[in-house]
Amino acid sequence: DTAVSQTPKYLVTQMGNDKSIKCEQNLGHDTMYWYKQDSKKFLKIMFSYNNKELIINETVPNRFSPKSPDKAHLNLHINSLELGDSAVYFCASSQAGTRKTEQYFGPGTRLTVT
Amino acid sequence: SQKIEQNSEALNIQEGKTATLTCNYTNYSPAYLQWYRQDPGRGPVFLLLIRENEKEKRKERLKVTFDTTLKQSLFHITASQPADSATYLCALDMRSGSARQLTFGSGTQLTVLP
């Protein structure tokens, strides 16, 4: 029933570790996104994939690497975690090529780096 | 780069009144402007989309206006209820190369008092 799901919901880890967040959507959309929401609630685009192809890559440290194995999945791998990476990460999806450009968001993954 | 400002970080109103939230932006107008609702611990949920050639859009108790001359959108909730308490985000829907990209404001936290 869930449209956009993310795992895990909470992730607590130490500086220097490598971690992954997974996202899946069952809406049949062809475009998926990763956003970062910081402590001030500001939501900022990180990456966007359309049909498994990277189309938006904002100024994000190259420690962050997205991977899209298929249209329904977009994972985010983070190397050498830093304190400043602590935030809530949201996955979203939408359908390109239509006038319905609204995005559907997952529940978020709260990452805490200690 | 595009800047988006949403009026006051927090807005308190009495139940039954109309809540009016403001979204101002600089630079060029987006093709679309969207409004989302975000509850604590959850992802944003799409509410309404308005196109640059539309002045007003309504959905039940919600109304959005879009003034490209003033570079402003207003979001109204009529007959507000405590259940409307949440953070409301406006987002500019811009084309970035071959992709569409949402740029979010920092949000206005609305509290409807019983």
Image: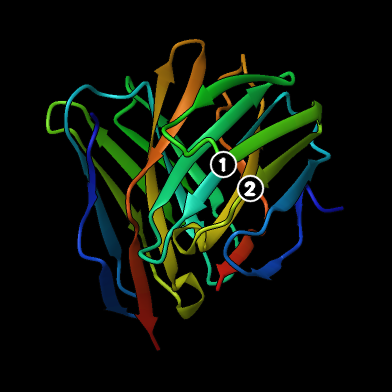
Structure colour scheme:
rainbow
Q: Write the residue at 27% across / 34% down.
A: B66
Residue B103 vs A87, above or below: the answer is: above
What amino acid is found at the position of numbered circle 2 in the picture? Ile
* Residue at 76% across, 62% down: A8
User: Total label count?
Assistant: 2
Q: How many other residues sit within 10 Å of disc 1, few (<14), some (14-19) or many (≥20)?
A: few
Q: Residue beneath label 2, please?
A: A78
| Residue B67 seen anywhere in this rendered image of the structure | yes
Chain letter of disc 1 in the image: A
| Residue B62 pos. (x, y %) | 43, 53
Chain bearing tag 2 is A
Q: Residue at x 77, y 48 (%)?
A: A22
Nearest to N terminus: mark 1 or mark 2: 1
Q: Position of residue A10 (x, y in %)?
A: 69, 69
Task: Report the residue marked by disc 1.
Answer: A63
Q: Residue furthest bottom?
A: B114
Count neighbours of disc 2 (C-alpha within 10 A) and say few if under 14, some if 14 to 19, many if 20 or more. Answer: some
Q: Residue at left 61%, top 14%? A: A97
Q: Helix or strand or loop: what does disc 2 sit on? A: strand
User: Can the viewer see residue B15?
Assistant: no
B85 or B78, nearer to the observer: B85
**Up-down: is B29 above or below A106?**
above
Pointer 1 with pointer 2, Cβ within 8 A? yes
Find numbered disc 1 in the image and state the secondary structure of the residue it sits on. loop
Above or below residue B90? Residue A58 is above
Which amino acid type is shown beneath numbered disc 1? Arg
Q: Disc 1 versus disc 2: distance between alpha carbons?
A: 6 Å
